[in-house]
Amino acid sequence: MTQSLEFTAATVESQQPENLQSLAVLWARKYYLSVASGQERGQQQPKQNLTETASIESKKITANKLMQKLNLASAKAWSLTETLLGEEIRRQDINPELINPLEIATDTRELFQKALDAYASGIPPQRLSVMVGRNCGLVRQKYTSVDPRAIGFVSMQFHYTGQKLLEWLSLDEQKVFAPYLKVMDDHMYMPLQAAYEAAAQHDEDSPLLLAVQHLLPLSTKIACEVCQSVSRQHPNYQSYSGALTAETVKISSIRDVEMFQVYLCLCVLDRTIYSVQQQLFPLCVMLYPCLKVSWTLVQEMLLFMSWEIQERLPLQDVPIFHPYLRIFSEMFSKEVFQNE
């Protein structure tokens, strides 16, 4: 695939031929079709109640309010991040110099400022996905280049900052602003930019690229089904943030299942599991025990994810993903975590 990864709004709207769309456009279109309409969280937003909140003038007021609260939200977020992960620096033998609170807070605030600027300008979530992808990719690259586990501190700081900002908004404002937060959260947690760059190395008719292009638009639906299946299996399970059915836990769980799918796509495009070995697995080993996510949940999630992918994708795509799905299952198996 030879197209540029930088797009103008006109390019996003006009570049429609199947198999010519970049992964960036596919991912952005996901927001147009689902996040922005409220279907990501299984909700239909009452349009008559949100019209005023979604107006440009209202968005400017909301963005200005959040911009004034951003420093405070960032400070509170770091306190939560440090409480959750502070002990992991010693336990995981992470170089403390790699975890610079001021630098992490500054980098995440700059990304939030871009999101708030876009929000105030009336730029829709799907367009924001294209606009900030490279910026988030550069931040991810910065913190994963020496020790990939450092991105865990950045992503949790980013997540908590967003949650603190939401607390200052009305329910209607939260509904309008939440899709923008999800765009940013996704890019911070997931190696989307790496996937875009890997896709650029493939011809437009590459079976590997086509398989990934088929999976990405389905990834949210798959994630929702997987999370529902896991929560039905464990109706009384309590994670660090609450029950699996709690709204904030559901949103984070769906994001995590999407994250695994993006890493799966990256493995296919790179023809190697290097990104999982170097980034995803160490990150999960660090974060999931702290978040009280059991390995049994992860194992069941991978099993349900594999079933959903096999059921939803064209038959010719399944063998492309199957070897990597098997490796995922083996890496997170009971044999690996038998003493946990």
Image: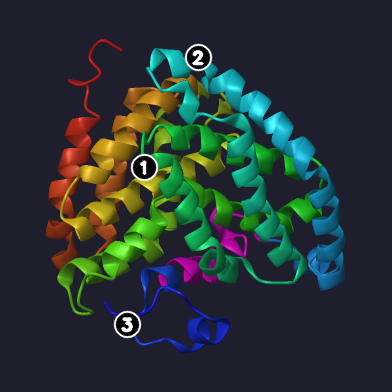
In the image, residue 30 lies at what x, y percent?
48, 66
- Predominant SS of the magenta segment: helix
Q: Mark 3–mark 2 contact, CB under 8 Å?
A: no
Few, some or many C-alpha atoms within 10 Å of disc 1 (few <14, some 14-19, many ≥20)?
A: few
Residue under label 1, please give it.
145
Going by the numbered disc 2, the residue's amino acid type is: Glu
Please give the label number shown on residue 20.
3
Q: Mark 3–mark 1 contact, CB under 8 Å?
A: no
Q: Which residues are magenta?
A: 26-44
In the image, residue 244 lies at what x, y percent?
52, 31
Dot 3 falls on a residue whose secondary structure is loop
Q: Quadrant of the N terminus?
A: bottom left
Side of 254 where 201 appears, left or right: left
Q: Where is residue 211, by image quadrant?
A: bottom left
Residue under label 2, please give it.
87
Q: CA distance from mark 3 to mark 1?
A: 31 Å
Going by the numbered disc 3, the residue's amino acid type is: Leu
User: Which residue: 44% across, 45% down?
Assistant: 142
Dot 1 falls on a residue whose secondary structure is loop
User: Which residue: 25% across, 18% down?
Assistant: 337
